[in-house]
Image (cartoon, rainbow, N blue to C red):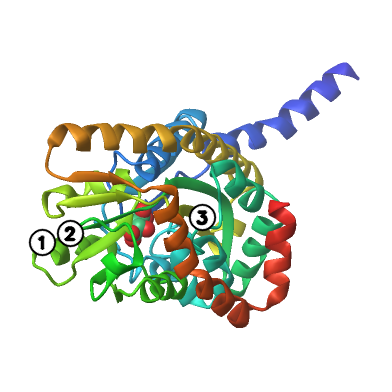
Amino acid sequence: RRQWLGALATGLLAPVAGLANTRAPITLRFSHVVAQDTPKGRAASRFKALVEARSGGRITVQVFPDGQLYGDHDEMQALQLGAVDMVAPSLSKFGRIGLPEFELLDLPFLFEDLSDVRRVTLGSLGQRLFNGLKRQGLVGLGFFDNGFKQMSANRPLLTPADFAGLRMRVQASRVIADQMRALGARPVTLAFSETRRALATGVVDGTENPVSNFWTQGMHQVQSDLSLTNHGYLGYAVVTNQRFWEHLQADDRELIYQALQEALDDARQIADVQNEAALAALRQSNTTRIHSLSPSQRARLQQAVQPVHQALARRIGPDWFQALQDALA
Ligand code: LMR
């Protein structure tokens, strides 16, 4: 009887083991628009290393940084069409695919610090934002940070009067465009990859970004002043195509998901450090004057952008603001 059981076991197990060995390799294409040496670039590399190590090389992650493959205008569409499998756009770039509620995170002077941000992104409001992605055939896999944005131009930007008449490059977010208008500037929506050149040639006068993006794009070579306004948050969501995601075997999906969560945890730890390091490098480079704001200058900027909050509330409805208030309470 034991023999019979043994034969049955081998008979049953052999094809299963065989199947495991011959499982088709998977290549996952991850496209993003920033440099490798940024919080997002580092998160993508860490994710790749974890997935490839844990799958014994059967699952490969190809990372395409710097908008090499797709830029701001087409990466989301490429994902929806299945031309890439993962992207990590800034939250400011979801409004134009019909999800304006993501622009809540763009509201100026909303968060005190990153722990405030995480109460929103890692809580039920973050989950609710992700639920909306289904309408676009997408799945949200996690949020992570770059950090707080600073303002740059060829002059200090410390009070609303300093913004008067400036053309400021913005991401495709109505909240950010409204913010620039409320400050007296003219917003110009441009893809990230076009920003440095537009600054260099005078197509725009200034922009906003965390220091890690400012530094790694070489914007310091074409902007004489950086004002440490810390006025708004820049964060990302890693999104995948629902069809791709559901076609994965459950254990592969789990492996990929776990590796991503670990990479994003790491990214959340290093975002501050990366922005600090970029600021230190910027100080050393002596290309750009760095300005701090007094509390009263900051208060004046904050006062000027208040209408932006009301305009978004009218667009997406008061219940999102209630949820935001609850998350931050
Ligand atoms: C930008 O377009 O300014 C940034 O969102 C780029 C990025 O993804 O960090």
Q: What secondary structure is marked by label 2?
A: helix
Q: Are marks 2 and 1 in contact (CB under 8 Å)?
A: yes
Q: Which mark is residue 196?
A: 2
Q: Quadrant of residue 320?
A: bottom right
Residue 180 placement, left or right of 141: left
Kind of residue at disc 2: Arg
Residue that carries the numbered disc 3 in the rendered image: 237
Within-10-Å neighbours for mark 1: few <14, some 14–19, many 20+: some
Residue that carries the numbered disc 1 in the rendered image: 200
Mark nearest the camera among 1 and 3 is 1
- Quadrant for ligand 1 reads bottom left
Position above or below: 94 against 143? below
Q: Quadrant of residue 13?
A: top right
Q: Which mark is residue 20?
A: none
Image coordinates of residue 97 in percent, x first then y, are 48, 75
Q: Residue at x 20, y 35 (%)?
A: 283
Total number of numbered discs in the rendering:
3
Measured in 3D between alpha carbons, the distance from the residue under mark 3 to the one under mark 2, in whole angstroms, is: 24 Å
Kind of residue at disc 3: Ala
Position above or below: 14 against 25? above
